[in-house]
Image (tube, helix red, strand yellow):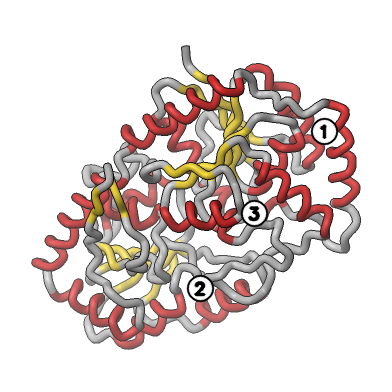
Amino acid sequence: MAVKILAIGDLANNVATIRKFVKSSEIHLINFNWEGNSVVMDDRSDIEFFPTNKISDFIKHVNEIKNEFDLCLAMSSTGLLVSYLANLNYIAYFVGHEIRSPPFIKNSKDPLSTDQPLYHFNFLERWFYKKAYENAIACVVSDEELFNISKKYGLKTTRISGYVEDTTVFNENIKPLEKKKTKFTFLSPARMGLQKGTDKIWQALDLCKTDFEVLQVKWFDNRTDKETELAEKWIKNKPSQVRFIPTMKREDLSRYFIFADAVIGQVSGLQGSIERQALLCKKPLIHYLDPKYEFNINGKKVKTPFILKSNEPSEIASVIDTIVDSQKIRDKISEDGFDFIQKISNPAKIAKEWDDIFKDYFNKYQKIESAVPNIKISFLRVLYLISNRLHFRKMKIFNKC
């Protein structure tokens, strides 16, 4: 019998993709109506969205339907908070800044971005977020960096072997975009920001000697005023090779991947879904990954295929020119990258790990409702709503925190 999972929140379509590949679990996803580019980019097929933007309504709706499910999967700090205040047994899934820059830390900043705090929560709100993180029955991560950060905060952390990417959407057989190409074309789909390395890419492009075009998706980090100011500066002073294109659905993004001659990914040192998707589409990828991050499958280290060994602008520029000039090198890094992604991001294998996690924790807890007494959780809900009104800035759930 399938384990029925209530998923609360999603980031970058991670849960939507997991749902597609699990075999012995049934996942019903309720997502928040995030603002901005998520309106376009989030998967909306067979996914429920909360009808309002009030946290009290989130909790009320979850409590109305929770008994139809066996266990909860929570994503985003807002998803964890709702799951905690709804008195659920929930598994947290961390994929980025929700654990790298958690909201329970005072003046929490993104270590890869500006020095401006991401949140303006008061003491009580931070206490509630801390409880929401600590009360997860398990905290799942998919890479070594996030595993170490989660463990640092004393959370009940477990690591799976990788991220599930949708191979039905991202693969080399997708029909390319029907668009005329006048010169060598790079696609740069990552969100602009310091944490993606846009500053270094912009500098590198000014140093390049070959002739090419860069299609940069026009979206950017705007969690703080400084991030927005930086993005506006980059847009106003873009390199001559850059042409902006609008955000798009995943299915259209895969067609852009196939259309492009090569892809420029993140160069800050981290790897995200954009890089994995480009490799699945068998595209030459310019991407810098900090060598301290290793990939191990079945106890064996997997060698990374990335040609970029430094994120200095001069090195990035040299590699860009090499990619433009050499079909032989493009073919080699495409093949090496495709072989690499097959090893680290096998959706059937990773989905099986998720099925096992859901089964194990359901067997342990037997029901979705936590053992915390209802009178206590009712008091905590009231206290949270009061704390939320004690500071000069209202809680913004739409910043994908």
Q: Identify the image quadrant of residue 306.
A: bottom left
State the separation of the CA atoms marked 2 and 3: 17 Å
Question: Residue 367 or 62: which is nearer the viewer?
Answer: 367
Q: Circle 2 is placed at which residue position?
A: 194
Whichever of labels 2 and 3 marks the residue nearer the N terminus, that label is: 2
Q: Circle 3 is placed at which residue position?
A: 401
Q: Residue at x 90, y 56 (%)?
A: 390
Q: Tell which tag, 3 or 1, sits nearer the viewer.
A: 1
Q: Residue at x 61, y 66 (%)?
A: 222
Give the image location of residue 123, x and y in percent: 82, 58
**For the residues bearing labels 3 and 1, Cβ distance under 8 angstroms:** no
Left or right of 231? Residue 278 is left
- Count residues near mark 1 (Cα–Cα under 10 Å), then give few for <14, some for 14-19, many for 20+: some
Q: Circle 1 is placed at which residue position?
A: 377
Q: Is residue 182 visible?
A: no
Q: Residue at x 69, y 69 (%)?
A: 117
Give the image location of residue 389, x and y in percent: 89, 53
Residue flagged by tag 1: what amino acid is it? Ile
**For the residues bearing labels 1 and 2, Cβ distance under 8 angstroms:** no
Give the image location of residue 28, x and y in percent: 56, 27
The quadrant the C terminus occupies is: bottom right
Disc assigned to residue 271: none
Q: For the view shown, which residue lies furthest in the left direction?
A: 328
Left or right of 283? Residue 237 is right
- Count residues near mark 3 (Cα–Cα under 10 Å), then give few for <14, some for 14-19, many for 20+: many
Whichever of labels 3 and 1 marks the residue nearer the N terminus, that label is: 1
- Count residues near mark 2 (Cα–Cα under 10 Å), then give few for <14, some for 14-19, many for 20+: many
Give the image location of residue 11, x and y in percent: 54, 47
Residue flagged by tag 3: what amino acid is it? Cys
Which type of secondary structure does the marked residue at label 2 adopt? Answer: loop
Above-or-below relation of 85 to 336: above
